[in-house]
Amino acid sequence: MKMDELMEDYDKLYQDEEQKKIYKKKKSDLVSKKLGELLLQGYRMLNSTCKKCDCILMQKKNEPYYCVSCQDQEIITLDMDRLNSQVLKDNPMIGQIEENVSSIFSEKKAENQHTTMAIDVGNSVNIIKSKIAWATEQLKNSNVLSYDLELLDYIKKCSETITILNNTKI
C-alpha cells in the first residue's frame, strides 16, 4: 500500500469522525430545544430514560410517555438524512448509479417522453414504498397513540398514492 493511499484512508476516517461529531452536536441541540419546548407546553420531565435511545422521557398529565429522540419528526428526519448520506458514503456505486440514471434521464427525455414518464412513475412508487417501510418500522417501535394514528394515516395516504400512480395511463 502506498503512502498516498494510507493518507487518503486516514483523511476519510478523520472526516467521518468529524461528521459524526457534528451530527451528534446537531441532534443533541435539537433534542435539548424540543425538551425545552415540551416543558413550556406543560410536559413533565421524568426520572427515567427511553430503553431504545437513552433519552429523557417526558409526560403530559394522563398521557403516555414521550421520547423526543424516538418520536419527534424533526429528529427522525435528521436521522434519516444521516443514514442516507452514510449509505451513499459506504456504497459509492449508489452515487455513481444515481448520476448515471439522471444523465440517462436527461438524454432520453427528448427522445421519448412516454418511457421517461413510466420510469418516473416507477421510481416514485419505489420511493413511496420505502416511506411506507420506514413508517411501519416507526409504528412497531412507537408507544404513543397519537403518533401511531399519524403513522397509520401516513401509510394509508402513501398506499392510496401508489394505487393512483399505478392506475395512471402512460
Image: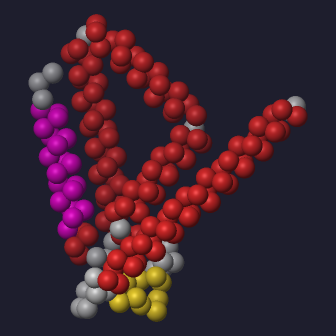
Along the horizontal axis of the image, is 71 left or right of 32?
left
Front residue of this view, candidates 158 and 74: 74
Q: Quadrant of the C terminus?
A: top left
| Residue at 28% across, 44% down | 128
Asked if residue 163 lies in the magenta stretch, the reply is yes
- Residue 2 is situated, as x and y percent measured from the top left of the image, at 87, 31
Residue 65 is inside the magenta segment: no
Residue 58 against residue 10 in the figure, above or below: below
Q: Position of residue 110 (x, y in %)?
A: 28, 9
Q: Main secondary structure of the magenta part?
A: helix
Residue 8 point in image, percent of width and height: 77, 37
Could you tell me which residue is drawn at 34 percent across and 46 percent down?
Answer: 130
Answer yes or no: is residue 67 visible: no
Q: x, y percentage for residue 132? A: 29, 51
Residue interval drawn in magenta: 149-167
Residue 104 visible in the current orientation: yes
The answer to whether 18 is drawn above or below residue 118 in the figure is below
Q: Quadrant of the N terminus?
A: top right
| Horizontal side of residue 126 vs 145, given as left or right | right
Image color mode: secondary structure
Examine the rendered structure and indicate whether residue 104 appears above or below residue 52.
above
